Amino acid sequence: MRSNAVGWLLLAPTIVILAIFGIMPFVYVLYVAFHQWNPFGANPLMIYNNGDNFRRLVFDQEFLTSIAFTLKFAFFAVASEIVLGYLLAQLFMKEFPGKGFFRTIHTLPLIVAPIVVGSVWRLMTTPSIGIIPYLLKSWFGIDMNIGRDANVAFALTVIMDIWHWTPLVTLTLLAALVSLPKEPFEQAQIDGANRWQIFWHITLPMIRPAILATVFIRLMDALRTVDEVWMLTGGGPGAATRYVGLHIWKLVFPKTDYGYGSAVSVIVLYLTLVMCWLLYVGLVARRDQKRTA
Amino acid sequence: MDRQIDLDEADEEAAAVAARPARQGFLPIVTNWFDRVFVGIYLFVALELLWMRFLEQSIPLTVCHVLALALGVLIVWKG
């Protein structure tokens, strides 16, 4: 039996950091979620309320609506990013003049802080001063007002997310595509497979782990998006873009309802885990099982 | 380090340890005990929330606790 002492010693810093910054805060949030706690209210003490926060959230129409909007946002944003990211990665696999320059420019949104992205997009879309409403009005006669039209506000939050995060997907998928061996593609070409068959039967199965990892990362990010949307629309008009992260922020900071905010946070974490697990089971576990059967 | 590690042997050992507890129960995938505990917790939480939303007015939540725990045990044991 090999000694694992060295392994545990090397892992120790990571485990300690994870415990302090990941597990302990989670346990604390879970603890707070079972209490009524408004530290700035008339009674600042934490009072155990027997799961009433969870009882409240299953009837909270605002929370349920924000979950529905968040799922819609995550679906459109992540699906578009994966498709666009894959197409751009395929483009970067080919040689063309100015490829290095274009690749650098394309990656720049990644280094911009989300709050700055939100500010820039707000400036670009504000009806009186923004370039996008101006161009839409002068070219197509479309009167775009992000503060009045819920569908436009929703679409803009999705487009902003796509603009910001597609480069991440491109880089991940590009790394996967570059690392693929050439032989299966050459064999498929010799066998007379067309481009679609090569994509469907060779490329896609071989980069599936990379796609899945990217979907997980982007899905988790999309489900907890706050700052960009807060800056662009502030959750409006009405509650059309009040995604669940923004809803939690409003509960915890302006309303200082820490107990209920924690309960909502725990449920959002739960939903994220369930969705990722279902994706994993649907796309990896069952397929691997069929292959070994 | 006084002795060299044989990476192939380490891989085989790790694969054997990881593969041993995996099994096929009534769940539609091959699972180990951690997967089943995970699924049990998912279902426990989902059942509690749904019960609070739709049934708690007529049937107390304690019934749900018992049912959810029983389901969790069943999944860990036979899943």
Image (cartoon, coloured by chain):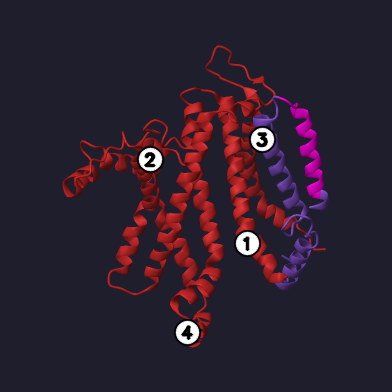
Q: Is residue A37 above or below residue A284?
A: above
Nearer to us in this view, A144 or A171: A144
- Residue A66: x %, y % from top left: 49, 36
Query: Marks 4 and 3: which is nearer the front?
Result: 3
- Between discs 1 and 2, the one toward the N terminus: 2
Q: Residue furthest top?
A: A42
Image-quadrant location for residue A31? top right
Nearer to us in this view, B40 or A266: B40
Amino acid at dot 1: Val
The chain drawn red is chain what?
A
* Residue of label 4: A189
Tell me how far mark 4 sits from mark 2, CA to CA: 47 Å
Cβ–Cβ under 8 Å for marks 1 and 2: no
Q: Which residues are magenta?
A: B58-76
Image-quadrant location for residue A170? bottom left
Q: Is residue A273 above or below residue A51?
A: below
Cβ–Cβ under 8 Å for marks 4 and 2: no
Would residue B73 be counted in the magenta stretch? yes
* Residue of label 2: A115
Q: Residue furthest front?
A: B58
What hue represents chain B? purple
Disc 2 packing (10 Å; few <14; some 14–19; many ≥20): some
Chain of the residue under the numbered disc 4 shown in the image: A
Amino acid at dot 2: Ile
Q: Is residue A78 above or below residue A96?
A: above
Tell me how far mark 2 sits from mark 3, CA to CA: 36 Å
* Residue of label 1: A284
